[in-house]
Amino acid sequence: FSDTSSFKARDDGSPNLESSPDVVTVTVRPVNDDPVISKTDIVLGDDKYENETFIIKPANLSATDPDNSDKQVQFRVTANTSAGVIKLSGKVLGVGSVFTLDDVKNDRLTYEHVKQDTLTDAFTFKVSDAGGGNEPEQTFNIALNPVNDSPEVVVPKAVTLLEEGSKTITGITI
């Protein structure tokens, strides 16, 4: 942004003197604004359960950057999940992998829970705009609802008895 102003100096004495006009140009050069993380934690409520895959939406994960597009705002994974996998368009992401705000806004980022009976998970990321400066780091926490699993019965191999005989059967668990 540039603007110019014209100035004159005047002496109110006697005689009244005035300088010729001079022009000053002021130029303001923009600086790269760092991205700001605006959403990070996800508590999924009644519709997200263990052992499911779901889309990570902008309501759950988002960032803002006034001087960059959604494709330029990048999230880089710095610590991976332990009870599931993050996927970008079906491809598993790991430490060092990158996805964009555009990916989040277009439903390309998913989380697949794979560790039964673990109801929390997390991954850590940094967000950047490739313009240098501060890259804020944040942990994305995931909380899932439990599933009422069917009980499992384990019994030993077949046991053979003689008529009117008895035998203790062990190894039964529920």
Image: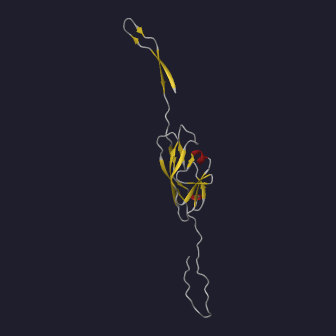
Q: Residue at x 60, y 81 (%)?
A: 157
Of 134 and 62, the residue lying toward us: 134
Is 9 drawn above or below residue 149 in the view shown?
above
Query: In the picture shown, does residue 90 fall above or below 149?
Result: above
Is residue 156 rendered to the left or right of residue 14? right
Going 40% across and 8% down the picture, which residue do you hit?
17
- Residue in the image at 57% along x and 45% along y: 101
Q: Quadrant of the C terminus?
A: bottom right
Q: How many marks?
A: 0
Can you give x and y, in whole percent of width and height, for residue 35 in the image? 51, 42
Q: Residue at x 43, y 11 (%)?
A: 19
Where residue 7 sits in the image (x, y, percent)? 45, 16
Q: Identify which residue, 74 or 58, lies in the foreground.
A: 74
Q: Is residue 70 above or below residue 79?
A: above
Q: Position of residue 160 (x, y in %)?
A: 62, 88
Q: Residue furthest bottom?
A: 164
Residue at the farthest front position? 96
Q: As drawn, which residue projects farthest toward the top?
A: 15
Q: In this rendered view, identify the residue nearer to me: 13 or 27.
A: 27
